[in-house]
Image (cartoon, rainbow, N blue to C red):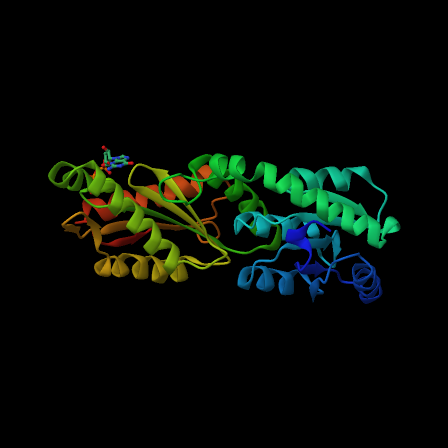
Amino acid sequence: MIPDLANAHVLLVEDNDDDALLFSYCCRQINNSHWRIDHSRTYDEARSMIESKSYDLYFIDYRLGPHTGIEVIHELQKLGRSAPIILMTGIEDERIGDEGLVAGATEVLSKQDLNSAAIARTARHGAIRRRAEGALRVRANEDGMTHTFNRAHFLALAEIEMARSQRFGHSLAMLMIDIDHFKHINDSQGHAAGDRVIQAVADRCRQTLRASDLLGRYGGDEFIALLPQTDLAGAGVLAERVRSDMRHLRATWGTLTTLATVSVGVACAKATDLARLPDLIEAADEALYRAKHQGRDRVELAS
Ligand code: GH3
Ligand code: MG
């Protein structure tokens, strides 16, 4: 086994206990490796485990009750987890493998071929590929300055989240967060100080939001967040927390310390029946516009 996987911490997502036992048995036979394996049996369990920890390897079964392994892969993508993801399938259907690779799996492993050599090979290939992709992927998906998702990647993930919330009848909320009078900060203290404020606002948003929420940089001084399974009232509470947390924000640049406030527009896909992502964005944007016009440093909910 390649050195960085010798003591890998592995998450196995598998609803069948016999298959899980076989998998663990095979892993113990891999030469020169001592994998620590955490096992989750359901999609919900997997979700909470991947949110609370990051693993060195993910082995995910395709069939998971009413869910599929593809949804777990989407969660991993959202969290920006970069370890190899191996999708395991018991069904001889190439389309499932293709779907897995498109969703972000590094390798596909047929459960019919489950043995220690096959597990070790997919793990090794996955790790090699991830290393090669690493820098490239981060650059393609992230905003370099704030390390939030860039606009294009945020929108791609948001489309997935939107489809899923509709499928399960969950509400989905959006926040548009814009720094108040940011031009003035740039003009009075310089562009570099402005950059520090943008970074500090991103950090504060990240601290306030949940791990399962998506945060992206939508434009210069504007951020966008998507909150799964959150209704308008709940999102309003969170938006208020984001806004009031900015009071403690101190962005320093040289000897300068800058304070900033933000305005937040909130919309919810279920409450207003917005079935398409552009409509949800427009509703959040309109609410933000109202927050700006009603004095800034405030939260407005879409009506
Ligand atoms: P409002 O309260 O209405 O939002 O006023 P504002 O001054 O914040 O207005 P606006 O949002 O239109 O200003 C955004 C400014 O952000 C304009 C642009 O020059 C600046 N900007 C965009 N990207 C960057 C960046 O990466 N760094 C810095 N320092 N400034 C940026
Ligand atoms: Mg602004």
Residue at the left extreme of this rendering: 188
- State the residue at coordinates (22%, 39%): 192
67 on left or right of 142? right
Q: Nearer the viewer, residue 289 or 35?
A: 35
Q: Position of residue 102 (x, y in %)?
A: 66, 37
Q: Quadrant of ligand 1?
A: top left
- State the residue at coordinates (60%, 37%): 132
Q: Position of residue 107 (x, y in %)?
A: 72, 43
Above or below, comparing residue 85 to residue 98 in the picture: below
Q: Is residue 303 visible?
A: no
109 on left or right of 11? right
Q: Position of residue 158 (x, y in %)?
A: 50, 43
- State the residue at coordinates (33%, 42%): 285
Q: Nearer the viewer, residue 162 or 185?
A: 185
Residue at the right extreme of this rendering: 112
Q: Nearer the viewer, residue 232 or 19?
A: 19
Q: Is residue 93 visible?
A: yes
The count of marks equals: 0
Above or below, comparing residue 257 to residue 23 in the picture: above
Q: Position of residue 256 (x, y in %)?
A: 14, 49
79 on left or right of 283? right
- State the residue at coordinates (64%, 52%): 4
